[in-house]
Image (cartoon, rainbow, N blue to C red):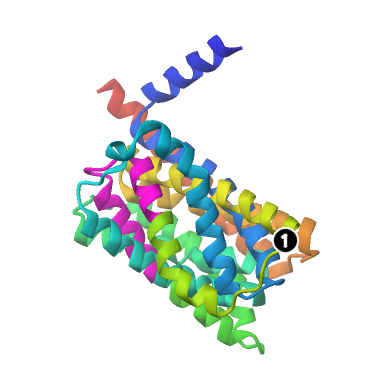
Amino acid sequence: MLKRLTHLKQRFQQAPGPTRAIAWAMAGGFAFSVMNMLLRKMSLQMHPFEALFLRHLFGFAVLLPFVIRLGLRHYRPSSVKGQVTRGLVHTVAISLWFFALPHLALADTTAISFTGPIFSMIGAAYLLGERMRGDRWLAALIGFTGVLVVVMPKLSGGGGWYYLVMLASAPVFSFSALLNKILTRKDPPEVIVVWQTLTVSLLSLPVALYYWVTPTAEQWGIFFLAGLFGSISHMCVTHALKAADMSVSQSVKFVDLIWATLWGFLVFNDLPNQYTLAGGLIIVSATLWISRREARRAREQASA
C-alpha cells in the first residue's frame, strides 16, 4: 500500500504544472467547503469575530507541531513585512466574510466568492505579468454569469445588505491571493500558511476579546476541525499557485458551489432554488471545459 502511494505521489509530481494546479485547487476547494460549513455553524452560536479568531488560532495550533519539529529557522520568511502585509489584507477580507456569513446560505456565500477569480485574473495579468489566454477569460466570464444567476434574485430581499458586504470581501480576498502568489516566488507554501494563521490570529484577537464567550467542549472540537480543514485548504491553494499561473487554479474554483450546496442541504436544510441549480450548471460547464483545455494544452507542451 505504501509503495503504491509513493508511486502515485511520484506520478503526480511529474505531471504538468497546470494539471497539478487544477488538482490542488479542487482538493483545496473541498477542504474549504468543509471549513465553511463548520464556521457557519459556529457563527450562528457565537459572535462572528470570536469565531474568526478561534478558526485561525486553531489553524495555527494544527501547524505548530510541524513548526516545532522542523524548527523556527525553517519557517523564517524571506520578507517579514510581506507576510505581515498579506496577513493584514487577509484579516480585512475575512472580517467582512465572517460578518455576513451567519445571514447567508452556504451556496450563496460560495457563489458570491466566485467574483474573486475575476479580480484575481485581472490583477495577475496587470500586476504579475501573467499571460491571460482568451479561453481562460471566457471560462471566468461564463462562470461569473452563473454566479449572477444565483445571486441577483437575492439582492432585492431584506438581507441584501449582507450580500453586498460579502460581495465587498471578494476583491480584498483577490488582493490577498495576489500577494500570496508573489510570496510563493521566494517562500514555500508551509511558511506562507503558518504566517497567515499567526498574523490573522493576532490581528483579530482584540475584537474577539471584546465579544468573548467561553466556548463549550463541543465548540472547541468543531474549531479544531475548522482549523485543520482551513490549514489544509490554504496549503492546497498555495501549492496550486506555486504549480502554475494564478489564472489556471482560479478557473476551476467555481466547482466549490457543488460542495457548498451539498453541505447546506445536509447540515442546514438549505434547499437550493432554481436559480442556484441553473447557475451551478453554468458554472460546472465552464469548469469542465477549461479543465479539459488546460490538460490538452499541457500535453501538447510536453510533447513539444
Give 160 or 66, whichever is nearer the viewer. Answer: 66
In magenta segment, residue 97 = no
Give 163 or 198, whichever is nearer the viewer. Answer: 198
- Where does residue 261 sit, x and y in percent of width and height? 69, 58
Screen quadrant of the C terminus? top left
Give 109 or 231, whichever is nearer the viewer. Answer: 231
Decide if residue 160 is on the left or right side of residue 121.
right
Q: Residue at x 30, y 36 (%)?
A: 74
Decide if residue 163 is on the left or right side of residue 176.
right
Mark 1 element type: helix
**For residue 22, which quarter of the picture?**
top left
Q: Is residue 69 above or below residue 140?
A: above
- Where does residue 97 sit, x and y in percent of width and height? 52, 71
Q: Is residue 104 above or below residue 222?
A: below
Q: Which residues are magenta?
A: 171-196
**For residue 263, which quarter of the picture?**
bottom right
Residue at the disc numbered 1:
264
Q: Is residue 95 above or below residue 126?
A: below
Give 70 or 1, whichever is nearer the viewer. Answer: 70
